[in-house]
Amino acid sequence: MAIKSIVEMQAKPGRRAELLSTLQEMSAGDAPGFIAAQHYRNFEDEDTVIGIYDWKSNEERVAWSQSVDPDTRERLTDVLATPMRIVLAGPIEER
């Protein structure tokens, strides 16, 4: 089942550009199961980025996540002010 991974990321003050650059490096691009990604700014906090990622399945999302280069993952952790908030969502099936 296709899923959306909605991720809220708060950069340390003044480091949003660095966060966006790191996210670009982490792009799933041609990873199996990856469909699309979009990033949005939070109107209430200029250092917060909302990422919405479409995947064919959660298993493929997890496999990609585990394959991210450790140095890149460390750069992401360093630029964040708080841990990422991740919500996984899927369509509501009408009966």
Image (tube, helix red, strand yellow):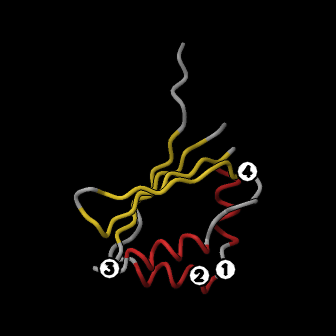
The tally of labels here is 4
Q: Three-letter amino acid code at disc 1? A: Asp
State if disc 3 and disc 2 touch (CB < 8 Å).
no
State if disc 4 and disc 1 touch (CB < 8 Å).
no
Residue 60 percent coordinates (x, y): 71, 54
- Element marked by disc 2: helix
Which residue corresponds to mark 4?
33
Q: Earlier in the sequence, mark 3 or mark 1?
A: 3
State if disc 2 and disc 1 touch (CB < 8 Å).
yes
Vertical comparison of 11 with 5: above or below: below
- Element marked by disc 3: loop
Q: Nearer the viewer, residue 9 or 94?
A: 9
Q: Which mark is residue 69?
A: 1
Instruction: Name the side, left or right, on which 2 lies relative to 51.
Output: right
Which residue corresponds to mark 3?
12
Report, in whole angstroms, how far the alpha carbon at label 1 lies from the one at label 2.
5 Å
Vertical comparison of 81 with 4: above or below: below
Q: Earlier in the sequence, mark 2 or mark 4?
A: 4
Residue 37, quarter of the rendered image: bottom right
Which residue corresponds to mark 2?
72
Residue 22 percent coordinates (x, y): 53, 76
Q: Given the current orientation, which residue lies at the most extreme left position? A: 44
